[in-house]
Amino acid sequence: FWLPAAAIWGSREREFTLWGKRYRNIQQQLLSALGRAARLSPDIQRALSMPAPDGVELEAEQLYLFLKESVQPLRERGITVQMPSRWSREGRRRIGMKMKMQPPASGTDGPAQAALGMEQLISFRIEASLGDSDISEDELNALVEAGVPYVRFRGEWIEIDPKEVRQVLRYMKRNESGEMSAAEWMRLEAEDGNERLWKGMSVTGMETSGLLASLMQGDMLRHLPMRPVPPDLHGTLRPYQERGFQWLASLSGLGFGVCLADDMGLGKTVQVITCLLDRALTAPPEEQREPVLILCPTSLLGNWQRELQRFAPSLRVHIHHGGRRVRGGGFAQLAASHEIVLTTYHLAGRDSEDLAGVRWSTVVLDEAQYIKNHRTKQAQSVMKLSAPHRIAMTGTPVENRLGELWSIFHFLNPGYLGTYH
């Protein structure tokens, strides 16, 4: 049970009774305990210079020295030091930055076009923050001038890192805004709040807007117009297949690689073929002139050839396979005269220079778990392929280890998931 010292000094009795217990000579006991504490703390010694001592006012620097130099010796002598519970509960307040994504400059085609595509640059404004609260430049300057970790801020004592404050203040004075790629923005927003760092500084909050926000919240399709099923598709999509096509086409159109992970037998192939037909109609003219590369296991070459002939007979298909396959400069010319080049993962490793030498409009990986080990020559050859649009198809994006998913996404959206480690 805690009593204020003033209550003890104010007692006129030599004995003090509390809840049936009797305490004798309490004033002498308190004075004796304070005397022992005063030998360990100059601040407590100063308090004893007045009659009936019940406290002492400390400046910020004095408080810091008391906590740094006196608390531990006092505790080692069995003297309890009680500090604000918030300090132990919240710990040091982090000084950091809040990033607010800015809308694209006027004249762009859509409300968030400048923020889409993994390599597109996102502009953002910077505001300083202390924990969850915004903090002004004047308040930052005041914290810097205090020069100690424990300061009085908005009516309460808090612990800060002065070095952190100076770093943020310097950056704020130089920059009120910044830029980063969409890939970096998405990776940073996905990080745990305590691990977000930008240029060595803590990022305490991020505000995403436009279609990028819809994409990251998972409701992007509700904010985009429905695409008509291409008239060249020979067949009818089931409702879930049409939804898959809309998702594939929308993400590809916005510049993101896509992993379609429907279970086996649900028609991933026809969804991707529909997406390729859509891109043939809607892609920029320069991309329409570039061929599509489809990589699959050798056992699926015939199936892909039949499915393309069945659902998209308008697309000219070249099968790059066998001992008589064309190599070198002739391969590039042959690829350019077809809409689709179909080959295998095995040949992606053997003919990597030929395949990497062509600018593809889209690269499709069927059974994408074939590149689950990013260290293999096969996977590294696939990573070198050049294409603005990438699709991975696999019913098992993770077979044994989470790193397999990283390998697939490193192909689809390089940099989004950071490094392998």
Image (cartoon, rainbow, N blue to C red):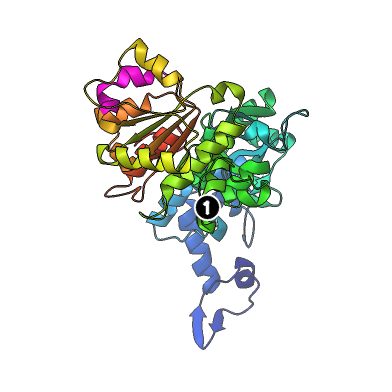
Is there any visible trace of residue 43 in the rendered image?
yes
Residue at 41%, 21% in the rendered image:
335
**Where on the picture, by quarter, is residue 364?**
top left
**Where on the picture, by quarter, is residue 308?**
top left
Quadrant assignment for the C terminus: top left
Residue furthest toward the bottom?
20
Residue furthest toward the left?
323
| Viewer-closest of 98 and 119 | 119
Residue at 62%, 38% in the rendered image:
97
Q: Is residue 353 magenta?
A: yes
Judged left or right of residue 263, residue 191 is: right
Residue at 61%, 26% in the rendered image:
284
**Where on the picture, by quarter, is residue 385?**
top left
Q: Is residue 133 magenta?
A: no
Q: Position of residue 27 (x, y in %)?
A: 55, 70
Magenta segment, prevailing SS (helix, strand or loop): helix
| Magenta residues (range) | 347-358
| Viewer-closest of 205 and 325 | 325
Q: Position of residue 40 (x, y in %)?
A: 45, 49
Judged left or right of residue 307, residue 222 is: right
Depicted 37 relative to depicted 27: above or below: above
- Residue type marked 1: Thr
Residue furthest toward the top?
329
Judged left or right of residue 223, residue 230 is: left
| Viewer-closest of 21 and 130 | 130
Q: Which residue is mark 1?
A: 236
| Viewer-closest of 276 and 303 | 303
Is there any visible trace of residue 92 in the rendered image?
no
